[in-house]
Image (tube, coloured by chain):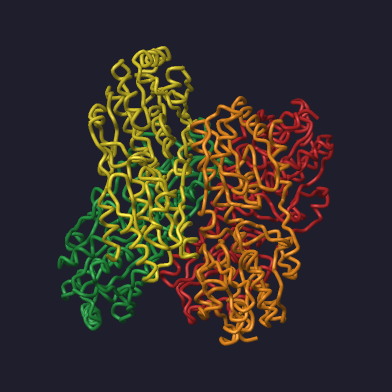
Chain colours: A orange, B yellow, C red, D green
Amino acid sequence: MKRIGILTSGGDAPGMNAAIRAVAKTAIHHGLEVVGIRYGFAGLVAGDFIPLTAEDVDHKISQGGTFLYSARYPEFAQEDVQKKGAEQLRKHGIDAVIVIGGDGSYHGALALTRLGINSVGLPGTIDNDIPYTEYTIGFDSACRTAMDAIDKIRDTASSHHRVFIVNVMGRECGDIAMRVGVASGADAIVIPERSYDVKKIAETLKQGFADGKDHGLVVLAEGVMDAEDFKNELLKYGDFDARANVLGHMQRGGSPTVEDRVNATKMGNYAVNLLLDGKGGLAVGMENGKPNTHDILDLFDGKHEGDYSLLDVNEEMTKN
Amino acid sequence: MKRIGILTSGGDAPGMNAAIRAVAKTAIHHGLEVVGIRYGFAGLVAGDFIPLTAEDVDHKISQGGTFLYSARYPEFAQEDVQKKGAEQLRKHGIDAVIVIGGDGSYHGALALTRLGINSVGLPGTIDNDIPYTEYTIGFDSACRTAMDAIDKIRDTASSHHRVFIVNVMGRECGDIAMRVGVASGADAIVIPERSYDVKKIAETLKQGFADGKDHGLVVLAEGVMDAEDFKNELLKYGDFDARANVLGHMQRGGSPTVEDRVNATKMGNYAVNLLLDGKGGLAVGMENGKPNTHDILDLFDGKHEGDYSLLDVNEEMTKN
Amino acid sequence: MKRIGILTSGGDAPGMNAAIRAVAKTAIHHGLEVVGIRYGFAGLVAGDFIPLTAEDVDHKISQGGTFLYSARYPEFAQEDVQKKGAEQLRKHGIDAVIVIGGDGSYHGALALTRLGINSVGLPGTIDNDIPYTEYTIGFDSACRTAMDAIDKIRDTASSHHRVFIVNVMGRECGDIAMRVGVASGADAIVIPERSYDVKKIAETLKQGFADGKDHGLVVLAEGVMDAEDFKNELLKYGDFDARANVLGHMQRGGSPTVEDRVNATKMGNYAVNLLLDGKGGLAVGMENGKPNTHDILDLFDGKHEGDYSLLDVNEEMTKN
Amino acid sequence: MKRIGILTSGGDAPGMNAAIRAVAKTAIHHGLEVVGIRYGFAGLVAGDFIPLTAEDVDHKISQGGTFLYSARYPEFAQEDVQKKGAEQLRKHGIDAVIVIGGDGSYHGALALTRLGINSVGLPGTIDNDIPYTEYTIGFDSACRTAMDAIDKIRDTASSHHRVFIVNVMGRECGDIAMRVGVASGADAIVIPERSYDVKKIAETLKQGFADGKDHGLVVLAEGVMDAEDFKNELLKYGDFDARANVLGHMQRGGSPTVEDRVNATKMGNYAVNLLLDGKGGLAVGMENGKPNTHDILDLFDGKHEGDYSLLDVNEEMTKN
């Protein structure tokens, strides 16, 4: 193995650049050449390749987004397109590939491996919805950004004795909502994986004001329902002042947290070692603070399990 | 004069607490007693008063919101309600009042002055829409929060070569949009006080991508139109990927910036000195970095002038 | 059990307030009364107790430091002083105590348990130097603060092609240095638990500049040696421009991170449940993301094991 | 005029990149070519020039430091070296130059102007010590960083009832100390331009604790004396617990504030217009929120006047 490629795929996430950096620096340490593939699998097929030196990635560790860019490219599900990709890699002497991204990235990495190019996938998505890893790159940063925003919103909620329903990211996965909800001291956390009782939430909020609380907070995962709709539901059972707030895309950006940088670095470093060992078709994850691997095939059958104990802990801190 | 009251009114703004602190500490320095009036003019009429010591306000300088709370209270426009307020103040031996807030606050302060309680108004609103002051308490913090969010949004915009239309606060006043737009390197800034040309904006964005720019940014004051609607207008003239984002209430909160703390402190300190001089019916503002005063009556006729040179500067940095 | 006490001991750490909040809210949920013991064990002996309601702790989750204050109190090692403490608790009807702090806290908690007051210890220290827990309250926040500062320092290092030796906290434990070093992309990480080779570090830095790197960074745990001395050692082997920087006490403060708030909440909640189960003399820790317990006695024989794999990963990203 | 150069000189400051961006974008708007001169006047003499497109500077507005690098180069005081610089510029067809930096930058800009290359200076230094401008690029960001650090230090100061003496930047100019001191609620602010009374400061701190304050804070400009020495002086008159903290180089870095970005943009834009008007030998500054100019020659006789009213305001908020 002389030359490896690296690409980012799917929605960007803080820490992707830190992972690219770790891959590049580790590979260079071992005497490999590193090629950045721009615009994900689209760029792979188009041959949009740039060489990466250790100096090119020096300042990337602290930057959000992905400097290799990302792009949607459903065409890569087709076998002939995959073959074109493998040809491009061979043409440029790229022996192996590391893919950072979400669900779709793993399909691509597996396809390349089957076509003879060992490829390894890293979990890069703010949603934390990948099986067999306790942690995806970007998750902690997204939680940080959401929590910081809610800390600000609480200032104005308290000044006016208001309830805020804050919509955080998570279409099918409530991990951001649960972690941010607990970290923000939410009165209620509402996620797609669990049913909820609007009336009971309204009662909790009313009780809070009655007891002298100066604000109310509901953290709502976007996959549940529209925040404005939820507010209207809530107001059927309580006459408090309420506002809905959608945090939106800023949750995807920003300089990555310590956790995201460290884990991205560990996994990027580990992935290169897997390739050096001649392995492919593997998904890297974090387990008890250490990188681990699973066959990508297993991932497709696996199911991410959120830390639902957070809901219980939060419930056990209310009055009723 | 032995005892002064202080209240916050209207929407909360970062730096209000710093102003309360400055008022309290300055008044205590001069041997006065200080009374915090909670919930704005509503609390004034209800007699919701708490004593404030220098130690009570020690940690408030860094906190967003207003620890004295605020409340809407249109009833204070009625003369009999104003009289009840003045009676409450007399009953509690409060000789003068400092009011921090927006437009409505000045009406209240003037009413109290006419009823024999010297009162002074401080500009506390993130919108910066008060005449005769170059600066309102909270404006810089709101701009900071919006800019920080846009810096994050730019990460994801760039990773995906997207255009973002970011809605910032400002119903009738484009000051936040202009300042944040320039500070964020926006391709276009759209405010209520000026007409705009959607087609031209779309051309600029298209040209940007054609020249190698990896993202586009439009900063839109909320008073202009809905961000989603603006996006749809824009997409009539360009086929780029675009998203709308409403930053929302977090712009009202957060620890105040240096500028907001310093100016809030200067104006709070100055306001106490005005009362010590037996003055009332005055609005404090900042002019060339120094506190100044105008008759509140003049404010009602005055008109805030935004720094529209920012639009020209921003235009002069585009290519066409 | 009707009433429990809570105190913070030793150096303050971000997340202590979040833990106090979780303890109070969980205890109140279970119908208990909660007493805040101010100034650590000193206040316990002096009887400096305040009642805590759910509303008292509402806003504490986002605040650094400890609102119950902390104090050094070596006198609590004496048996007669411990007895006085236990008497105070009994006098005030306090049946059990939760102690948040470092090493000394556990000795105190054990002493109280032996005197019949079930007590449980929570790991509250930025240093992460407690055995049998992968995580102490405040560690992630301290790393965040150090990393943010180094991100700023890198701006100026790069502008002037300088090497910075940044001293971070950690007298006997290199955990902050290792995690921050990796997260900051340090050229070298120097900790008390490992030997180091100044000459080799100087060679790495010189090689970096020769290859086009625009700055150099050494992260140094304070326990190793003075940063200025280290710089002078380094300059014996290289003629680059170098500066030493001691980050200092700010690493102890600031609003806690998501991780610190979530873990403090989980552990605080868990500790109350231990007391409800009639247990005492236990140390709560985190293991694989979940709260666990060990006998405090075991802690005294245990030894914290840092994640030294971080050093290897960092080494494996250099060129030699 | 067809082509202009831009360089940064002296210590780096947040907002320099925003100024470079504004210069480049404005010049390109007017059909000019832009050349980045790396490493300040050293690079000018060495001919270290790079072309700058609008896209090259797109993301620079939010980055600290100077991507054109800076360097000390006292040799540029010599006339023959200046002539070499002018020759390099002519050789590369550079008709005019904009210099961003501190005191030394102006001397260089004047020398170039006298040699026939119109040059304009922009105030880029965190110290705010340039005459005829109310504001230098980087000053607000440095104050922000220092204030944020002190907010954190206050958490730990309060938790332990300690006094902190915090050393902020400013060798001969107390502007950072004054602004940060007021914004941080310091008990005392000590600057090189004013005498101070250690005993009185100690009395204020003791009185604070006696009245129930839970911490003490002295903000000390580095030019006054060593923070550790100041602490020892202070402890002669008080028996409180005190610590010294030097904030150091991080004050130079970090993403620039709104204020710094906006003013850097205004001044950069304005400077290009001066060159377009055929002017040179001028220093751009900010006066009442608008860019203005003075002859560089006047600057050398001028004297920066700090806003010493901040000291009076701070004094007037103490009890005595």
In the rendered image, which quarter contains the N terminus of chain A? bottom right
Image height of A160 relative to B75, above or below: below
x%, y% of residue A144? 57, 52
Residue D73's quadrant in the figure?
bottom left
Apparent side of residue A109 relative to residue D20 in the rendered image (left or right): right
Task: Tell me if residue C314 can be seen.
Answer: no
Task: Tell me if residue A70 can be seen.
Answer: yes
Q: Residue at image x 68%, y 69%?
A: C194
Residue D51's quadrant in the figure?
bottom left
Image height of A135 relative to D47, above or below: above
x%, y% of residue A107? 66, 70
x%, y% of residue A162? 53, 33
Q: Residue at image x 66%, y 81%?
A: A117
Q: Nearer the viewer, residue B288 or A37?
A: A37
x%, y% of residue D165? 47, 48
Q: Nearer the viewer, residue D259 or A8?
A: A8
Apparent side of residue C302 relative to residue A85 in the rendered image (left or right): right
* Total labels drawn: 0
Residue A320's quadrant in the figure?
top right
Apparent side of residue D295 relative to residue C127 in the rendered image (left or right): left
Q: Residue at image x 26%, y 35%?
A: B292
